[in-house]
Image (cartoon, grey):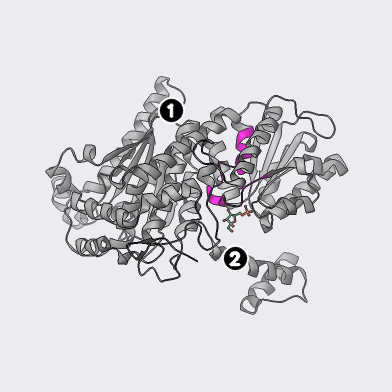
């Protein structure tokens, strides 16, 4: 496996080979000023540390860094050629070193003029046309089921990257979904999940989209099995006519009886967690229409181009990646909380969780060396202000310092007084939380409130806790695409800084293998039994059999 070199330093290797890394290590040992002081000394800090990125505005001023920190971080990005890696990713170079292939999610959502000559991308793009034709047929009420009735529901089966992105997009853009066509999602192996998704629907008017890049995923194939039974009960042998396969393994879909015209191909080079802008987004296209779907892709592409072109000091994705590395590797902060102050972005944290943790949850560099630093943070989150009433106690006064992404949308869907007021309250809460985290409340300030001395410590807020604010003008197909692509490029940027391959996920395989073996053992008593779970299996069996 060959790795690009920079002045003889392996880019796919541990980051501390870069001189800026050592400077950052020394810098991190120095006591950085408290955010209170940083703002007191520089009231225009939020202007200087705010960055426009297409329609988004990113405010890094509430992060624990000075101009000097930023200088070292930008040097690191230069030495690790992060922008170069984002460029190579966009133009379809072989950046996925352990699987020996390009990562073409960016190429897929690029206009033809930008990226050419990648056969699988051409196939992927041709699929967009087929998707649009079918999606329009369904939306226009021209799609007929096997019994001749009009299709009015789509049930999307898929898990991980074959679920999280599409579910987020349909939920976030619900205001654009077609009034007559219902799009539902089912991801889990738990029968309740599928039953809920099928509840109240009619097999005669329902299409099932089986979405799996590998078409080997246990959960999705089991759900497809369940859905086929449900369809067969309603329309008999024609059940297969109501199934669309979305996959990078068309041969497997064919082997399950799906005819060519009911298979939408995903390029192998599109990673699951980066796959919204491919046939994996078919159900999204049905829900919001081909035009809006392409606006999502255009929004994503704008960010891809900025990330692959702007110098580090002006490159929002790279700056966010640098701040992640600063927090994770130098300030030893183990997690990152994602808190969107928008109901329609409530599925964003789980999507970013997969993008980030499946890309950066690695203990080995591309060149197989030990990275000798912490890598991917634990990503978690929930929508604001709900989160304030759940885990913000820990964010403010806990012993762990948790960097937080706060995401705001300026314009709500409706502009009546109640909505505008609601929006103002949402954003006021976001700003209040960013300030409370940053500036805290000192013991003396608590005392001036007349708080009894024995409660002062309990009501003191250390502050100096970091947050990044991302402001969106509105939640539209384009801005949603921009936000998702910003997290993707940020993640790829962090991987480049740490010498990791963000495009593989070998770590998910062992659990799958064991699950198959234990599953066989459960259904077939003579099969291999798991010695470490003998008692659990015995109790499970006895409880199951009642
Ligand atoms: O197990 C993890 C994973 O492979 C993810 O990377 C992927 O998004 C998900 O499972 C679903 O995989 P598939 O699309 O092949 O069904």
Could you classify mark 2 by the number of other residues whose Cα lies within 10 Å: few (under 14), some (14-19), or many (20 or more)? few
Residue sitting at 55 percent across and 64 percent down?
Answer: 506
Residue sitting at 25 percent across and 63 percent down?
Answer: 19
Residue 272 belongs to magenta span: yes
Q: Which residue is mark 1?
A: 412
Q: Which residue is mark 2?
A: 509
Picture quarter with the C terminus: bottom right
Q: Position of residue 518 (x, y in %)?
A: 68, 70
Q: Give the structural element (helix, strand or loop) at label 1.
A: loop
78 vs 147: above or below: below
Q: CA distance from mark 2 to mark 1?
A: 42 Å
Q: Position of residue 498 (x, y in %)?
A: 38, 61
Could you classify mark 1 by the number of other residues whose Cα lies within 10 Å: few (under 14), some (14-19), or many (20 or more)? some
Nearest to the observer: residue 37 or residue 135:
135
Q: Dividing the picture into quarters, in which one does residue 432 lie? A: top left
Residue sitting at 46 percent across and 43 percent down?
Answer: 485
Would residue 271 be visible to someone looking at this image? Answer: yes
């Amino acid at each position: 496996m060959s790795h690009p070199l920079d002045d003889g330093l392996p880019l796919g290797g541990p980051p501390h080979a870069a001189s800026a890394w050592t400077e950052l290590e020394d810098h991190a040992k120095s006591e950085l000023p408290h955010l209170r002081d940083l703002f007191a000394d520089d009231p225009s800090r939020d202007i200087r540390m705010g960055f426009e990125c297409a329609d988004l505005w990113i405010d890094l001023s509430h992060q624990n860094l000075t101009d000097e920190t930023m200088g070292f971080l930008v040097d690191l990005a230069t030495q690790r050629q992060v922008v170069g890696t984002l460029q190579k990713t966009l133009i379809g170079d072989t950046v996925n070193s352990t699987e020996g292939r390009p990562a073409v999610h960016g190429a897929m959502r690029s206009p033809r003029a930008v990226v050419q000559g990648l056969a699988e991308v051409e196939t992927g793009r041709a699929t967009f046309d087929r998707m649009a034709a079918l999606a329009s047929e369904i939306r226009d009420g021209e799609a007929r089921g096997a019994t001749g009735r009009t299709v009015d529901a789509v049930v999307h089966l898929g898990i991980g990257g074959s679920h999280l992105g599409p579910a987020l997009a349909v939920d976030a853009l619900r205001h654009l979904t077609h009034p007559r066509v219902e799009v539902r999602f089912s991801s889990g192996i738990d029968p309740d999940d599928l039953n809920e998704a099928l509840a109240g629907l009619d097999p005669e008017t329902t299409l099932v989209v089986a979405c799996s890049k590998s078409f080997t995923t246990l959960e999705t194939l089991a759900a497809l099995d369940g859905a086929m039974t449900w369809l067969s009960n309603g329309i008999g042998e024609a059940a297969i006519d109501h199934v669309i396969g979305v996959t990078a393994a068309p041969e497997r879909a064919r082997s399950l009886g799906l005819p060519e015209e009911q298979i939408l191909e995903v390029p192998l080079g599109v990673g699951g967690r980066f796959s919204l802008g491919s046939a994996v987004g078919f159900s999204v296209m049905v829900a919001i229409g081909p035009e809006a779907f392409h606006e999502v892709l255009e929004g994503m592409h704008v960010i891809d181009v900025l990330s692959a072109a702007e110098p580090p000091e002006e490159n929002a994705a790279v700056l966010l990646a640098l701040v992640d590395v600063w927090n994770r590797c130098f300030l030893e902060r183990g997690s990152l909380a994602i808190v969107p102050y928008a109901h329609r972005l409530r599925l964003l944290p789980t999507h970013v969780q997969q993008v980030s943790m499946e890309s950066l949850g690695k203990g080995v560099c591309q060149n197989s060396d030990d990275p000798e630093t912490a890598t991917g943070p634990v990503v978690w989150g929930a929508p604001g202000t709900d989160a304030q009433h759940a885990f913000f106690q820990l964010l403010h006064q806990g012993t762990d310092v948790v960097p937080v992404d706060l995401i705001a949308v300026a314009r709500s869907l409706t502009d009546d007084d109640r909505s505008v007021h609601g929006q103002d309250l949402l954003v006021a809460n976001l700003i209040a939380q960013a300030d409370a985290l940053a500036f805290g409340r000192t013991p003396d300030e608590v005392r001036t409130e007349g708080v009894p001395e024995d409660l002062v410590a309990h009501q003191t807020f250390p502050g100096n806790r970091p947050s990044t604010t991302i402001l969106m003008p509105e939640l539209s197909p384009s801005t949603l695409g921009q936000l998702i692509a910003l997290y993707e490029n940020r993640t790829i940027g962090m991987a480049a800084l740490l010498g990791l391959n963000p495009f593989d996920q070998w770590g998910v395989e062992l659990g799958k293998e064991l699950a198959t073996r234990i599953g066989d053992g459960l259904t077939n008593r003579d099969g291999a039994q798991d010695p470490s779970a003998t008692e659990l299996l015995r109790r499970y069996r006895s409880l199951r059999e009642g």
